[in-house]
Image (tube, grey):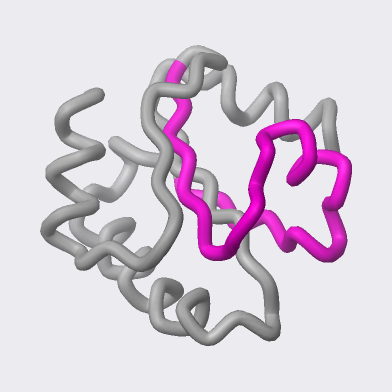
Amino acid sequence: MKSSFNSIINSDIPVLVDFFADWCGPCKILAPILKEVKKELGDSIKIIKIDVDKNQLLSARYQVRGVPTLLLFKNGRQLWRQSGVLQKNDLIKVINTYQ
């Protein structure tokens, strides 16, 4: 996963990474919000989901201590990070800040 993850986040369009867990209640709330964000922003954003239980090394590398944790990358650089659930409009504002 590490090499493909690195190639994904090196994109010149923003990449939103959702570190989640199947057992996490707030993660289940965030999932449909992310789908709405993708539907609204289309190809101007990539959204990927990383299961922290299946990708422990990657989670440790980015010091993910709680789920959900969202990270926004562009050209391989981390631009923004937040833990917890954000509403669709708040998330879109953050993404548009880094377009």
28 vs 91: above or below: below
Q: Percent from the top left, x then y, of residue 98?
A: 24, 24
Q: Percent from the top left, x then y, of residue 77?
A: 50, 15
Membership of 58 in magenta stretch: yes
Q: Nearer the viewer, residue 25 or 74?
A: 25
Q: Percent from the top left, x then y, of residue 33?
A: 31, 71
Question: Left of 65 or right of it: where is 47?
Answer: left
59 vs 73: above or below: below
Question: Left of 76 or right of it: where is 31?
Answer: left
Q: What residue lies at 71% left-to-right and 24% top-to-bottom?
A: 6
- Give the residues drawn in magenta, as a range: 47-74
Outermost front residue: 65
Q: Quadrant of residue 97?
A: top left
Q: Quadrant of residue 40?
A: bottom left
Membership of 94 in magenta stretch: no
Q: What residue lies at 65% left-to-right and 52% top-to-bottom?
A: 65
Question: Left of 27 or right of it: where is 37?
Answer: left
Q: What residue lies at 39% left-to-right and 23% top-to-bottom?
A: 79
